[in-house]
Image (cartoon, helix red, strand yellow):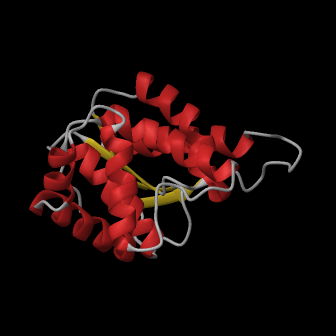
Amino acid sequence: PTSVAPGKVEVVEVLWLACPHCYALEPYIGNWLKTKPSYVEFVRVPVMWQPIHRAHARLYYTLEALGRQDLIAKAFDTIHDLAERKLPPLVGSSDDETFRVQQQFATQNGVSADDFAKAYNSFTVSSNLQRAEQLTQRYHVEGVPFFVVNGKYTTEVAKAGHDCAQTTPSCGEKKLIELIGDLVATEHRH
């Protein structure tokens, strides 16, 4: 099931902000988004497995609720920079510490502490987290990045690039984008 209007095709990317494979796929997704057909509705949904995934999902939806998609991209970059340096990736050892770390990230990037706290604890963010949890379970997401096309087809880099030679970097990513394009076109015709 999707929530898109008739004539539209929904593409959902299930991701984790600390996933190196999701991060490596970003340039391919960015290029595809610039050229995707106008009838495609692209939605990102953070995966909801463990506490660290939930913490990053809450940050994602908080920044989205604040209308700061630019900071979602910056959080993605920051998390990977911190991970490379073996530092905690915008999470703490407790929920309270995670909130403080994420709020500090937001305030350093122009969001007021009060606005962040209100959004972080909002009904909107809680509802989005609940929907992400349901989607993660419904599609039996076991790895990310994971894609759902129009609520019918699921795929990921390993499936799309199953015939790629190990020595061919980015083959799987390119084949994934091609497969998504093919599935979108098929769905649009029906």
Relative height, residue 31 to residue 97 (above, below): above
Quadrant (top left, top right, bottom left, bottom right) of the N terminus? bottom left
Q: Is residue 152 visible?
A: no
Relative height, residue 104 to residue 138 (above, below): above
Q: Nearer the viewer, residue 151 or 119?
A: 119
* 90 displayed left or right of 124: right
Quarter holding residue 168:
top right
Quarter holding residue 132:
bottom left
Q: Is residue 132 visible?
A: yes
Q: Nearer the viewer, residue 116 or 73?
A: 116
Q: Position of residue 82 (x, y in %)?
A: 60, 48
Q: Position of residue 181 (x, y in %)?
A: 48, 38
Q: Number of numbered discs present? A: 0
Q: Residue furthest right?
A: 167
* 36 displayed left or right of 123: right
Q: Nearer the viewer, residue 104 or 23?
A: 104
- Residue at (63% x, 53% y) in the render: 83
* 97 displayed left or right of 7: right
